Amino acid sequence: MSCAKCGSFLAAAVVMLAAAGSAEAARLRYHYSPADDRGTMILRPLTSGSPGERLTLSLRWEPYNCPPPRATRLVTFCHPFSKRNITLPLGLPIDTPVMEYRTNRTIYNYGSYTVEIHFLADGTTDVIYSSGLRRAQ
């Protein structure tokens, strides 16, 4: 391949990559605990004082100082450990998810976006919002 063809190929590759934009990928975790006996759950700041945590490329959770996505639904679950009804504010898209149920979590799967509700043994919950290519399966 001549130098002119190599240069044209590289220029085309750079243009294609620039036009593609960046793929956002995030995994954010927020912790909720009971606020009252009626099952209302509220966001509890972490020991670091931040409202949430973000999973980094090194697979460590670090403080994340942004609030959770705006709640679009209040969803009631029966907590599998406390056996009480709890109501969580969740930021769910309008689309219809594929629902997945495990013994300790419920997953709203929208394809490239998921919302996982992890029920913890102490009666609290973690809500994990995942988007992008690095989303855990």
Image (cartoon, helix red, strand yellow):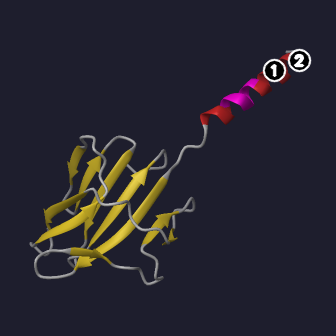
At x 74%, y 24%, the residue is 12
Prevalent SS, magenta region:
helix
Find residue 30 and report its horizontal and vertical position in percent.
Answer: 37, 69
SS at badge 2: helix
Magenta stretch, residue numbers: 12-16
85 to 5, vertically: above or below: below
Is the residue under label 1 in contact with that under label 2 (CB below 8 Å)?
yes
Find residue 127 and report its horizontal and vertical position in percent.
Answer: 32, 64
**Residue type (three-letter) at the residue carrying disc 1:** Ser
**Which residue is denoted by mark 2 in the rendering?**
4
104 to 10, vertically: above or below: below
- Distance CA(mark 2)–CA(mark 1): 6 Å
**Which residue is denoted by mark 1 in the rendering?**
8
Give 75 or 63, whichever is nearer the viewer: 75
SS at badge 1: helix
Task: Confirm whether the magenta stretch covers residue 1.
Answer: no
Q: How many other residues sit within 10 Å of disc 2, few (<14), some (14-19) or many (≥20)?
A: few
**Residue type (three-letter) at the residue carrying disc 2:** Ala
Q: How many other residues sit within 10 Å of disc 1, few (<14), some (14-19) or many (≥20)?
A: few
Asked which quadrant contains residue 57, the reply is: bottom right
At x 39%, y 79%, the residue is 45
